[in-house]
Image (cartoon, helix red, strand yellow):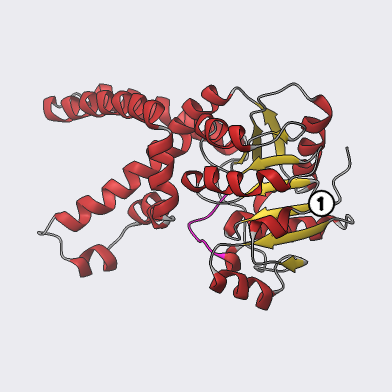
């Protein structure tokens, strides 16, 4: 299967980075984009984002070989319902949502027979959002997980090749397992970061200026992700409720154990725990998943 036209529905960080990464490949691929907000569409046109920016999702998907839903997971069902009747046979429909079971359940019923639905999740991002936040290098050496609900090897291979051309590594995973893994590696850490910012705000003995002026690197680095899009994260937790609650329960148990060690002066337990978790952290760094891809000139190829 050959991908010659890509439609991007939603024009935030991920969609804009997809466009710049496609242009970097030099492949003869036309990219059409759209967004619900007229202001976003106008910004996209102004900065040259997408080869063509159209006003509706229906216009964007006309004759597209690949359609990527780059909207919050809570909005995907409505978009799929709108575009379903206008998709040509053989089109690959994918997404970039952070949960996969909910996307399969929400989008799949609205797609006609003959369309290949292969949910996807590029594990890449920054705390920035909007059409001006994207850059071509975002996916370099990052993983993109595909969670197909069918066994169309040609379509899966074509989508995997597309993501690899953007610099990503590709893996195929069961959707429910994906949601559990991401609850550990992304969803719950974001929730904890939001919570820590809330704690700092609620602790009235520490004034706002002190939090801002004396933020050590640990606080700044740890809570950076709390600047992420609140609509997206609301939808993520509503969609991945069971896995998130399971991991939160396990986290709470670990936290209680550490709390007990601190209260009882059990330094050996603390040292052993920190030593073990530091080793895990180092393995993450060695795997190349430590930091966000650098922004080498936003909006440029």
* Vertical order, 197 against 54 (above or below): above
- Residue at position x 68%, y 68% in the image: 299
* Vertical order, 257 against 219 (above or below): above
- Nearer the observer, 155 or 247: 155
Q: Residue furthest front?
A: 85
Label 1 neighbour load within 10 Å: few <14, some 14-19, many 20+: some
In magenta stretch: residue 194: no
- Residue at position x 46%, y 45% in the image: 74
Specify whether 139 is left or right of 36.
Answer: right
- Nearer the observer, 115 or 174: 115
Residue 42 position by quadrant = bottom right
Label 1 sits on a secondary structure element that is loop
- Nearer the observer, 169 or 104: 104
* Vertical order, 1 against 216 (above or below): above
The stretch in magenta equals 125-130
Say if residue 170 shows up in the picture: yes
Give the percent coordinates (x, y) of residue 179.
50, 29
In magenta stretch: residue 129: yes
**Looking at the rendering, in which quadrant would you find the C terminus?**
bottom right
Specify whether 265 is left or right of 12.
Answer: left
Give the percent coordinates (x, y) of residue 276.
41, 25
Residue 39 position by quadrant = bottom right
Give the percent coordinates (x, y) of residue 249.
29, 25
* Vertical order, 127 against 301 (above or below): above
Which residue matches tag 1? 63
- Nearer the observer, 275 or 22: 22
Q: Main secondary structure of the magenta part?
A: loop
Q: Residue furthest bottom?
A: 46
**Looking at the rendering, in which quadrant would you find the N terminus?**
top right
Say if residue 142 shows up in the picture: no
- Residue at position x 23%, y 28% in the image: 258
């Amino acid at each position: 299967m050959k991908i010659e036209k890509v439609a991007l529905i939603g024009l935030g960080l991920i969609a804009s980075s997809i466009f710049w990464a496609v242009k970097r490949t030099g492949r003869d691929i036309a990219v059409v984009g759209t967004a619900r907000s007229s202001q976003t569409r106008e910004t996209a046109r102004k900065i040259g984002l997408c080869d063509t920016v159209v006003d509706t999702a229906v216009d964007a998907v006309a004759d597209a070989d690949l359609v990527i839903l780059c909207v919050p997971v809570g909005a995907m069902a409505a978009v799929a319902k709108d575009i379903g009747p206008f998709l040509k046979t053989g089109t690959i429909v994918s997404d970039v949502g952070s949960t996969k079971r909910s996307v399969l359940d929400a989008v799949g019923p609205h797609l006609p027979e003959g369309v290949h639905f292969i949910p996807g999740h590029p594990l890449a991002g920054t705390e920035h959002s909007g059409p001006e936040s994207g850059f071509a290098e975002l996916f370099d050496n990052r993983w993109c997980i595909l969670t197909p609900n069918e066994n169309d090897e040609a379509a899966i291979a074509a989508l995997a090749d597309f993501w690899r051309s953007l610099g990503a590594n590709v893996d195929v995973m069961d959707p429910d397992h994906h949601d559990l893994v991401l609850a550990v590696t992304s969803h719950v850490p974001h929730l904890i970061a939001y919570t820590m910012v809330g704690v700092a705000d609620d602790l009235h003995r520490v004034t706002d200026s002190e939090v801002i002026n004396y933020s050590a690197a640990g606080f700044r680095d740890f809570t950076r992700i709390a600047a992420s899009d609140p609509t997206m994260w609301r939808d993520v937790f509503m969609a991945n409720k069971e896995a998130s609650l399971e991991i939160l329960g396990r986290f709470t148990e670990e936290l209680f154990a550490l709390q007990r060690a601190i209260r009882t002066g059990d330094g050996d337990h603390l040292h052993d725990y920190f030593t073990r978790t530091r080793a895990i952290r180092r393995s993450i760094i060695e795997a190349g998943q430590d930091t966000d891809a650098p922004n080498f000139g936003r909006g440029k190829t």
